[in-house]
Amino acid sequence: MSETTEELSLANARVADRENVLATATSERTALSRAMEQNAALKDQLTHLQNALAISKQANEEADAELAELRSKTNEEKQIVAHVSDSNQQAAPSFVLCDDEKKRLESALEIERKIASDAHLKIALLETEIADLRLKSVS
């Protein structure tokens, strides 16, 4: 009888060991499943961030090109205004701008200045967005 009791005790110990192994395996399987889900979510988030960064870079390049064009136009208009001012100071009878033409040129210059200012603001906003995206992609 003592031999049977001993065998029963060993069998119970083996069952307990197997239950512990099974519990550990189940726990590790659950942890692995969560890690895989989290990895998939992070990959998806990274893809979205990379797409947003590409869009921001493209918008920034477009804004830079627009700004360069506006600077060029502004410089041209400054030269025209300077020429008009020089002409008015010399009071040359051969070339005198009427008030309407002068106002039109000044208005066009003011519009170009506003567009340039808006472009600067857009660039600053895009740079902020890019910085935010970089921070999010790092963390």
Image (cartoon, grey):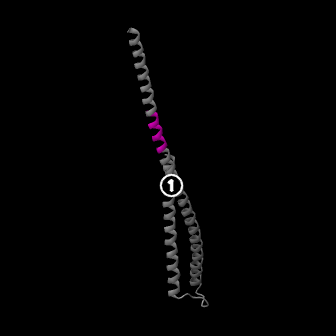
Q: Position of residue 33 (x, y in %)?
A: 46, 40
Quadrant including the N terminus: top left
| For residue 80, side relative to residue 24 (left or right) | right
Magenta stretch encompasses residue 32:
yes
Q: Position of residue 59 (x, y in %)?
A: 54, 63
- Residue at which label 1 appears: 48
Residue at the image position 57 percent from the left and 77 percent from the top: 77
- Mark 1: which amino acid? His
Q: Position of residue 26 (x, y in %)?
A: 44, 33
Q: Quadrant of residue 82?
A: bottom right
- Front position in the image: 91 or 126: 126
Is 136 rendered above or below residue 103? above
- Front position in the image: 50 or 4: 4
Residue closest to the far top: 2
- Front position in the image: 59 or 34: 34
Disc 1 packing (10 Å; few <14; some 14–19; many ≥20)? few
Is 130 rendered above or below residue 33? below
Across the whole image, how many numbered discs are drawn on residues? 1
Q: What is the span of residues highlighted in magenta in the rendered image?
A: 27-37
Residue at the image position 55 percent from the left and 58 percent from the top: 54
Residue at the image position 46 percent from the left and 36 percent from the top: 29
Is 116 rendered above or below residue 128? below
Q: Is label 1 in a helix, a strand or a loop?
A: helix
Q: Main secondary structure of the magenta part?
A: helix
Magenta stretch encompasses residue 127:
no
Q: Position of residue 18 (x, y in %)?
A: 44, 25
Residue closest to the far right: 94
